[in-house]
Image (tube, rainbow, N blue to C red):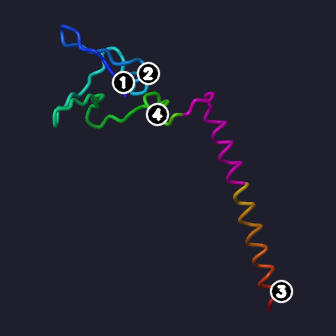
Amino acid sequence: MSSVSVSSKGQVVIPKNVRERLGIRTGSRLELTEAAGELRLRPERLPGKTATVAEGRGLAGYKGPRISIEEMNRAVREAAATEDERIRDSWNRSAGRKHRRG
């Protein structure tokens, strides 16, 4: 949680790490709601507009190096091949036991 001060003009400064995480830039519009004595600010979204990948960057908490789509696809293919091999081995062992019983 961050704490901010209110200026004499009623202005507050949103901390940089929060702005970056939420994709708030100069000129961004924020929606202000008040309920039960609390204020809530959130980035305003136009109807039908979805967030961009860049706006979501960092939300999952990943702190490592950037990974390209090609690297991600390769990792998924390798994981799928490993899982496929594990399933086939398990199936073959199971089929071998059934065959020996008969």
Of marks 1 and 4, the one in the foreground: 1
Image coordinates for residue 10, horizontal then vertical, percent: 19, 13
Left or right: residue 58 versus residue 29 is: right
Which numbered disc flags the more N-terminal residue, 1 or 4?
A: 1
Which numbered disc flags the more N-terminal residue, 1 or 2?
A: 1
Foreground of the two, 47 or 43:
43
Foreground of the two, 12 or 95:
12
Residue type at mark 4 is Leu
Q: Mark 3 = which residue?
A: 100
Q: Secondary structure at mark 3?
A: helix
Seen as rendered, the residue at the extreme bottom is 102
Seen as rendered, the residue at the extreme top is 8
Image coordinates for residue 98, horizontal then vertical, percent: 77, 84
Residue type at mark 3 is Arg
Residue type at mark 1 is Ser
In the depicted structure, whether residue 69 falls above or below residue 98: above
Label drawn at residue 59: 4
Q: Mark 1 = which residue?
A: 2
